[in-house]
Image (tube, coloured by chain):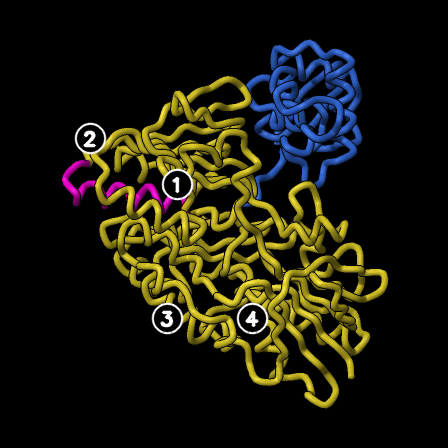
Amino acid sequence: MKKILILGAGTGGTIMANKLRKVLDREEWDITIVDKHKTHYYQPGFLFIPFGIYNKHDVIKPKADFIPAGVNIIYSDVDKIVGEENKVLLEGGKVLNYDFLIIATGTRVDASETPGLKEELWYKEIFDFYTVEGAVALKEYFETWQGGRLVMNIAELPFKCPVAPLEFVFLADEYFTKAGIRDKVDIIYVTPLPGAFTKPIATKMLGELLNEKNITVVPDFYLESVDNKEKKIKSYDGQEIPFDVLTIVPVNKGDDMIERSGMGDDLNFVPTDKHTLRSEKFENVFVLGDASNIPTSKAGSVVHFAAEVLFENLQCAIKGRELRAKFDGHANCYIETGFGKGSLIDFNYTTEPLPGYYPLPGVGPFGLLKNTKFNHYGKVIFRWIYWHMLLKGKELPVDNEMTMAGKKR
Amino acid sequence: MAQKTIAGVNLEVSDEGYLADQTQWTEEIAKEIAKEENIELTEKHFEIIKFIRENESGLTIRKVGKSGIVDIKGFYDLFPGGPLKISTKIAGINKPSSCV
């Protein structure tokens, strides 16, 4: 029996388990997936929790519900990968051998990387919303907040779901407007990037929208530490920004297991061929999604598109053929902009987000870099699509490769 | 792309002043670009420039901070403003792209 081992039963690992089980002969191929947690989180939903739009139960389901029959699931922490010997050691000493390994262990936030972040104000006046615990704690804080300086800061690049902090400040603007205290709330968006976003056209559109909503942007701010006494964030070049409440995207890192395996870069992301998705170190190891160091967004849509490429390439590798599929870095992100509207961006390694329509040229129904009600509906409907179609590896009516049709320069 | 004469050499540079052809880079060119950024290059600067030229792929401020040459604060002190943007321009490599 030949073995495919998948590490991580998040979005990427779950999609691959579903896709592979459908095509690989059960007599010939054993598929095993390993994850330390039993709960699957719908991570795009975390953003809505602080504003009372979703609650905790809207974003969690058992992982086992999405793993198909015929795939073994093991709930355990991974000690390390020994690529030279084609084996993975689990915590407690169990050994799993593989013919092919898929690393899909994602990225996580690590507040301990920044001095002063995880100290006395943590979950009292400093919150993240990239964990369900942080999002719920923030909801409770906002419910009775009287107003003041709300600072949204991104600690380090790259970070998961790069539009989420923007959506957060847009939704905060709406939330405090509706609470009748917007005039008492200053919203400040502090980013290490040179503007609201990385690429010029999207930065302009989003920058104007932030301005319209009276949200201040502080660019080029690289966080050094947090001062809990004076309630300030400090940058390496001596800038200081005071806050009453700080919401933060802490430093993102790959799984510690990657470090223990000696397979990561300085943030534990695995060096990966950005087109074939094969690990740079081992021929029979592939990396899917946030766990890799490929230069595109760390986001569910990317994992979904990349899974198509990996699926094809893994079948080539199984047959000993050259890897045929090439990932283009395709990402597609809804951006909630508040008051029932949303925007949408669609881009890849070489094409920045451009205005236009998606997925049908000239028709949409979604507008690229436009602020519309329909885009917001897209995001709302997506949760259903995620649970019922995407995780199960079903076809969605969008192209895996980015297309220029419908886009205007 | 634009043409620019730096240290007596006619070079092609991007709109933001990054060298189009990395192989044309010399220490003299580095000194000239640094001057435009109001930086007088010291040996320490050149140690960092060497490091970033050798580690262009996946270069981050954090990575330079772990290089053993300077810590992040020291990197800011040597290249004030935007250390990665400025040091890569002086080092004659591509402007680092943020992967967002």
Of the two numbered discs 2 and 1 on the same chain, state the one appearing first in sequence.
Answer: 1
For discs 3 and 4, the disc positioned in front in the rendered view: 4
Q: Give the Cα distance between marks 3 and 4.
A: 16 Å
Q: Give the Cα distance between marks 4 and 1.
A: 31 Å
Instruction: Spot the blue chain and give its letter.
Output: B
Residue closer to the observer: A204 or A293: A293
Q: Is residue A310 visible?
A: yes
- Residue A175 covered by magenta stretch: yes
Of the two numbered discs 3 and 4 on the same chain, state the one appearing first in sequence.
Answer: 4
Tell me if residue A357 comes above or below residue A183 in the rendering: below
Residue drawn at point x = 54 percent, y = 33 percent: A114
Position of residue B71 measured from the top left corner of the image (x, y, whole percent): 67, 23
- Amino acid tagged 1: Tyr
Chain letter, disc 4 residue: A
Q: Would you name the residue on which mark 2 appears?
A: A184
Chain letter, disc 1 residue: A
